[in-house]
Image: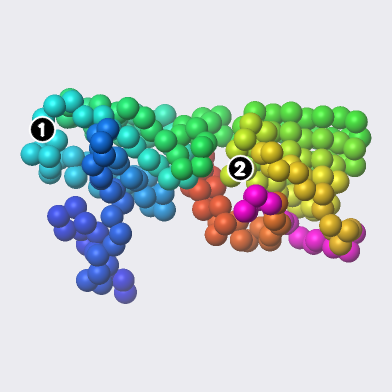
């Protein structure tokens, strides 16, 4: 059985130290806080709290600008408030900016995934801000555009454009993926001929890698886009 304990603010498993969830580096402009995107944010906040409470000599002094980098993670407003509350115990630590590594806004859309039902027929255009879950089909000649990711619980046979405002982490997923065209951020891909009726089967998703659109099976989603799993967990009631 895996044994885990915490000592001096550090997690240990079977006698081996884990990678810190919070790394702090000094820069010319102040302090850089690097928060591990692979840990539950509650665990990261717990480690941050420990380090802020147990480094009194380090935190004393003149006003210091703080830059927080979240990796690819987005956080909710409540999570942001809790993080800012931890820093507020040291009046000289002034949060200057909070950033993600992929250029996305650091705050997640509090509305979560918008669910719509219906069929997008030829000549129709469905536009949405944020992530979209469509319960229905997109027929040939139909178009779906979103600033976030697009999930189609049905057949996608028309055009789909995800990440419409430059979000390169957005994906396009469908139960049956036979699009006439896919777009993610500024990248356009026309599917190969083998994507015909006998081509891609099962639920698949498209994503950007090395500036090109790739397609993979849905069970690979959490490996390729681990930050999406965090987002889905956050919206779960």
Viewer-closest of 156 and 102 = 102
- Residue 94 place in picture, x, y as percent: 25, 26
Callout 1: SS: loop
Q: Residue 204 colored magenta?
A: yes
Callout 2: SS: loop
- Residue 37 place in picture, x, y as percent: 41, 49
- For the question of whether residue 171 can be seen, the reply is yes
Q: Is residue 12 above or below residue 9?
A: below
Please tell me how crowded label 2 is: few (under 14), some (14-19), or many (20+) other residues with Cα within 10 Å.
many
- Residue 211 place in picture, x, y as percent: 65, 49
The picture quadrant where one finds residue 151 is: top right
Q: Which numbered tag is attached to residue 60?
A: 1
Viewer-closest of 81 and 57 = 57
Query: Which range is magenta?
Result: 197-212
Residue at which label 2 appears: 168
Q: Is residue 46 left or right of residue 196?
A: left
The picture quadrant where one finds residue 31 is: top left
Q: Residue at x 38, y 40 (%)?
A: 69
Q: Residue at x 41, y 53 (%)?
A: 38
Q: Is residue 217 left or right of residue 91?
A: right
Q: Residue 211 colored magenta?
A: yes
Viewer-closest of 234 and 194 = 194
Q: Is residue 5 left or right of residue 1?
A: left
Q: How many marks?
A: 2
Mark 1 in CB contact with mark 2 (< 8 angstroms): no
């Amino acid at each position: 059985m895996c044994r885990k304990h915490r000592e001096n603010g550090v997690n240990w498993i079977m006698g081996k130290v884990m990678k810190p969830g919070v790394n702090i580096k000094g820069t010319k402009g102040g302090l850089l806080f690097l928060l591990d995107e692979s840990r539950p944010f509650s665990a990261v906040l717990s480690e941050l709290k420990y380090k802020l409470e147990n480094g009194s000599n380090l935190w004393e002094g003149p006003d210091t600008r703080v830059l927080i980098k979240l990796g690819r993670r987005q956080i909710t407003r409540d999570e942001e408030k809790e993080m800012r509350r931890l820093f507020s115990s040291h009046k000289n630590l002034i949060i200057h900016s909070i950033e993600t590594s992929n250029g996305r806004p650091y705050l997640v859309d509090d509305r979560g995934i918008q669910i719509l039902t219906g069929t997008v027929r030829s000549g129709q255009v469905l536009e949405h801000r944020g992530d979209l879950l469509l319960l229905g089909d997109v027929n040939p000649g139909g178009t779906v555009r979103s600033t976030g990711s697009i999930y189609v619980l049905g057949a996608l046979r028309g055009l789909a454009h995800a990440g419409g405002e430059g979000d390169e982490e957005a994906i396009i997923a469908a139960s049956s993926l036979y699009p006439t065209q896919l777009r993610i951020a500024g990248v356009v891909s026309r599917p190969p001929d083998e994507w015909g009726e006998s081509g891609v089967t099962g639920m698949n998703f498209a994503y950007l890698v090395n500036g090109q659109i790739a397609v993979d099976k849905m069970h690979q989603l959490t490996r390729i886009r681990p930050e999406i799993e965090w987002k889905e967990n956050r919206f779960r009631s």
